[in-house]
Amino acid sequence: MALHIEAPLAKSLGLHLAILVLLLFSADFSSTPEMVSVSLESEGQAPVEAVAVDEKLLNERVEQMQRERDALKAAEEKRIRDLERRAEQAEKNRTTEEQRLKRVAEEKRKADAETQKAKAAAAEAKKRQQQENAKAKEAEQARIVKEQERQKAEDAAKAAEQKRKAEQAAAEKAAAERARQAAEANQKAEQERAMQEQLAKEAQARSAARARQAATEVQRYIALISDAVDRSLYKDESMRGKSCSVNIRLATTGFVTSVKVLGGDSNVCDSALRAVNRIGTMPMSSDPDVYDKLKDITLRVEPQF
């Protein structure tokens, strides 16, 4: 039987339907949708038959809006990741350029120092050559004087022999001193080698201890993150004994930059995604080694009752 609705009543019906749609959009879509009906009464008239909302069309529209919101959210997360990646690359470029400039400055300083050292060595060599030339000239003059003074030849020969012996003794003494210094240098080098070996062993032990500590910290923070996600889950009995694996990427502050489902029960996965997004920022260590292990983790979410 066809239902004839007067114009005022039709306007009232349209208003009620609009309110109903708004209420449905603000409701929790995870629950089972029910058939909704509206009863309208107009003053002075008989009640109008209930008008049922097309549940299928309504659900399709809700799912479409949900997909659009998910697409917008994914695009925003991608934009944030791109911004973080570009900022990280810019910082790397800046650091690389600073290091290059420091190397150039250090190389120039060393080159200047070598140049000054070479100039000083050349000046010293020239000075020694001049002194040696002067000594040679004096020696020649002395030889001429000795030749001219035959009377003093024997005394000069004796003086030369004594000088030779003194020089030989000085040379032997200098050789002994050089041998002593070489032995000391070898001993010092051996001590330095032993010290370096000991330092290397100690550094290796410290590194191993730090690695063990970092591994323990990583496990502790994974447990904290898992506990935070479990406490934020919306649970029901249908999830008991079921699980979902999710991948979570975190900034250095623990801020969640992305989360995606890897597989598992659909209800648990949906609840896990909403829980991670509600938390927003996870527990995070200030230790760079620990963060490096936590920045991209796969978490198995299994509701605890």
Image (cartoon, rainbow, N blue to C red):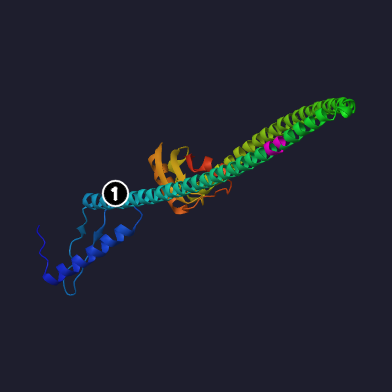
Taking the magenta stretch, the answer to whether it contains residue 8 is no
User: Residue beneath label 1, please?
Assistant: 67
Residue drawn at point x = 17 percent, y = 65 percent:
48
Circle 1 packing at 10 Å, graded few (<14), some (14-19), many (20+), is few
Q: Does residue 252 appear in this view?
A: yes
Residue drawn at point x = 40 percent, y = 49 percent:
86
- Asked whether, in this view, residue 49 is left or right of residue 19, the answer is left
Taking the magenta stretch, the answer to whether it contains residue 132 is yes
Magenta span main SS: helix
Residue type, mark 1 in image: Arg
Residue drawn at point x = 68 percent, y = 40 percent:
127
Q: Nearer the viewer, residue 57 or 205?
A: 205
Q: Nearer the viewer, residue 225 or 114?
A: 114
Q: Quadrant of residue 19?
A: bottom left
Residue drawn at point x = 47 percent, y = 51 percent:
255
> Magenta stretch?
129-133
